[in-house]
Structures are given as structure tokens and as C-alpha cells.
Amino acid sequence: MELRHIRYFLAVAEESNVTRAAERLGIGQPPLSQQIHALEKEIGTRLFRRTGHGVVLTDAGNAFATDAKKLLQDARHAVEKAQSAARGELGQLNIGFTGSAAFNPVVSKLIQTYRQSFPGVKLTLAEGNTAQLLDLLHDGSVDVAFVRLGGESPTGVQLDHIATEAMRVVIPSTHPLAKKRRVALSDLSQEPFVLLPRVVSPTLHDVILDACRNAGFVPREGQQAPQLSSVVNLVAAGFGVSLVPSSVCQIRIDGIAYADVLPPNVSIRLALASRSDDSDVKTNNFVAIARGSSG
């Protein structure tokens, strides 16, 4: 049984007239009658009874019509669903982000815009450091990831610039410089620096070390932090000082103070990472929105 037979049957049932149904369908009356007879033969019973003004459904025809309408509706729905999926409007998108990226308003705005544009796509979120997120990206566990990387893309990874953030000094509230709004890095040359291991976040690690070298000193590496949000807690505990992206300054806890860096300013880039060979429409839609937002 073909869907066109269902469509022909319902047209005749709705018009109660083969000639009018044929005109509506854009086919000849004889071929339509032949298709209806073929359908009746396949089912094994008459579906229509002729009258002086046209045709009416038999009891079997009425019974068949109920499910035939649903069958045609289901077929249309299946086609529409497939077309929606092909446009990236259905399915699941897995998004990774570093702990500090979650504080950046550009990230939340981008995700909000995507959700509004593609409400049928389920989003899953995974937090990790840059190294972990790149591994998840490579093995397909995440489709896109907000990371802090330099200008060069790792092999197989496409990077799209999202935002540039100024770095700010974070120091214990008991530090002599804690009340200053701006601090020169050179004034921190004797302080231990709380840093993320380079293997965890190479760009952030290098930005801090390069900034200190440009200020005329090599920083004393103190306690290492497992993730960026932990840097603030370790500074509050008195383990040293550090530099953090400005969005991290939303973390307000007792025992710390933030300050701008005196010129030359220090900044770090936030990027959206995706697989270079990813042809998934959902991923491409997300990347396109990100490019539009940053352009």
C-alpha cells in the first residue's frame, strides 16, 4: 500500500465525488478510479458505495478513513521532522566550557541566542580545564568548547575568537596593596604566584609568565591550583597572588581584593573550539551564531 493510495482515498472520501477529487488531485478521473479499485482489491473489501450524486463511504471505508488520516498525518510529520533535523533544529549539542568562561557574559548570551533560535535542540554542558576539553572535543564527547587558547589552533581544531578580556590582579585583602585600584606587576615581584599548571591551561599560564617577564621579573611559582576558580580561594588562603581574567572577578569571597593592572595592560583571548572536520549542522549553526556575535 502506497501513501499516494491513501491520499487518493481521502480525497474521494472528502469530496464524495470521484470527478471533483480527480480535479483536486490534478489527475484524470479514470486513473483515479483505477487506483481506488486497486486499493479496495488490496484491502479485500469495498470502501465506497455509489449513489446518484457521487460516492459515500461504506462501513469498512469509514473504519479505514480514521486510521488513514492518522497514517497520512504521521507520514507528513515524519517528513517535517527529518527536514527539521537536517536543518539542525532537532537533536543534542554538547557544549564544554572552562570554569572562567562560564563567568563571561558573552558565553551566556551566545548560548541563550542559540536556544532561542533552535529550541528543539537539547543542550548538555560539561565543565573542565582547557586540556580536558580538547580531549573531549577530539573524542566527540563535546561538539564545541569555550577555551582560552593562543592564536594557533591545535591539530584538528578550529578556533573562533569570542572575546578579549583584561587580566586583573587578585591579592589577599591583608596585602599592603589591597586597597589600591591599580597595581603595577613589578610591585609583586617578590610574591609567590598561584598558577594553573601549564599542562592544564597553557595559554593562561604563559600570559601570566610573559606579563611578569615584561614587567622585569620572573614570577616565583607558588601553590598550583587545579582550576581557575581555585586560584581565588588559594589567594584568599594566603598562598600568594595571581592574575585572573576580569570575568572571574564576579567571584566575591572574604579575604581577597582585585585590582587593575597598571599599563601595559594584560589581556587574554576567549575562543570557541570545534572540530575542523565536523559537518554536523547543529555544530555549524552554533559556530555561525558565535561568529555573528563576535563580528
Image (cartoon, rainbow, N blue to C red):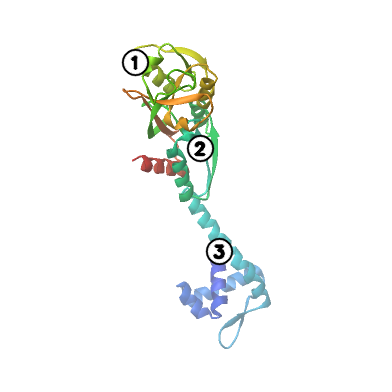
Depth-wise, is mark 1 or mark 2 nearer the camera?
1
Name the amino acid, label 2. Ile
Q: In the structure shown, which secondary structural element does the residue marked by tag 3 occupy?
A: helix
Residue lying farthest to the bottom in this orientation: 52
Name the amino acid, label 1. Ala
Check disc 1 and report the residue beneath it: 215
Q: Residue at x 58, y 60 (%)?
A: 74
Q: Please indicate whether residue 104 sits to the left or right of residue 91 in the image.
A: left
Depth-wise, is mark 3 or mark 1 nearer the camera?
1
* Residue 154 seen: no
Q: Residues within 10 Å of mark 3 (few under 14, many from 20)?
A: few
Name the amino acid, label 3. Leu
Image coordinates of residue 116 in percent, x first then y, are 47, 50
Say whether marks 2 and 3 touch (CB < 8 Å): no
Say whether marks 1 and 2 touch (CB < 8 Å): no
Q: Which numbered marker is on residue 140?
A: none
Would you place residue 290 above or below residue 55 in this image?
above
Would you place residue 181 above or below residue 31 in this image?
above
Image coordinates of residue 112 in percent, x first then y, are 47, 45
Q: Which numbered marker is on residue 95?
A: 2
Q: Which numbered marker is on residue 3?
A: 3
Q: Residue at x 59, y 70 (%)?
A: 38
Q: In the structure shown, which secondary structural element does the residue marked by tag 2 occupy?
A: strand
Q: In the structure shown, which secondary structural element does the residue marked by tag 1 occupy?
A: loop
